[in-house]
Amino acid sequence: MGSASIKFDRYPNATFSRVFNDILGFRTICSNYEEVLCLETEEKIRVVDMSKGKSNDDGYRGVHVYYQKDNKHYPIEIQFNTYYDRQLNDWLHDKFYKRGYDSFYGQILRKYYENGRIKLAEELEEVLENVLHHCEKI
């Protein structure tokens, strides 16, 4: 429930059901996002495409699929990621999101990852430290 509390604090004006839309959720790996995006035509399915980033891009990539039987039931969330994106998403979750850094830094970490400058969790920590302390030109 710790993450639920953080989420509620982050979105104080949102409805309860909007904030807690992932009480039951799963993660899985997909080979590409196109196969998941095809699900948006299915009844009772809502697809949220973050494969190219969120509107407030923080480096996260993925596609979330929500199934809701009806309005009396909370939705079930399935997070789909490619292996490539899951790796960075896990590192960002452990080293970045929980510490409350600005999403701008997540974008920078994503660029370093995509350019091959981050291949290990330790390298992410080093790049993050450099970026936060402006030791490295961005």
Image: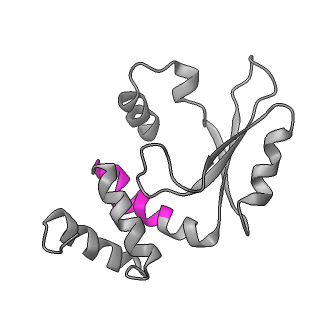
Residue 35 lies in what quarter of the image?
bottom right
| Residue at left offset 36%, top offset 67% | 109
Q: Residue at x 74, y 23 (%)?
A: 73
Whether 22 is drawn above or below 13: the answer is below
Residue located at (28% from left, 49% from top): 102
- In this rendering, is residue 66 above or below 113? above
Percent x, y of residue 50: 58, 50
Magenta-span inclusion, residue 58: no
Residue 135 percent across, percent down from the top left = 13, 73
What stretch of residues is rendered in magenta? 89-100
Q: Quadrant of residue 120?
A: bottom left
Horizontally, is 16 left or right of 57 in the view? right
Query: Horizontal placement of 51 versus 19: left or right?
Result: right
Toward the viewer: 42 or 6? 42
Q: Is residue 116 above or below residue 46?
A: below
Q: Nearer the viewer, residue 114 or 95?
A: 114
Across and down, in percent, residue 39 comes to 81, 46
Magenta segment's dominant SS is helix
Q: Quadrant of the C terminus?
A: bottom left
Q: How is the image coloured?
A: one colour
Q: Residue at x 65, y 51 (%)?
A: 63
| Number of numbered discs visible in the structure rendering | 0
Where residue 42 sits: x, y (%)? Answer: 86, 38
104 displayed left or right of 5:
left
Q: Nearer the viewer, residue 98 or 114?
A: 114
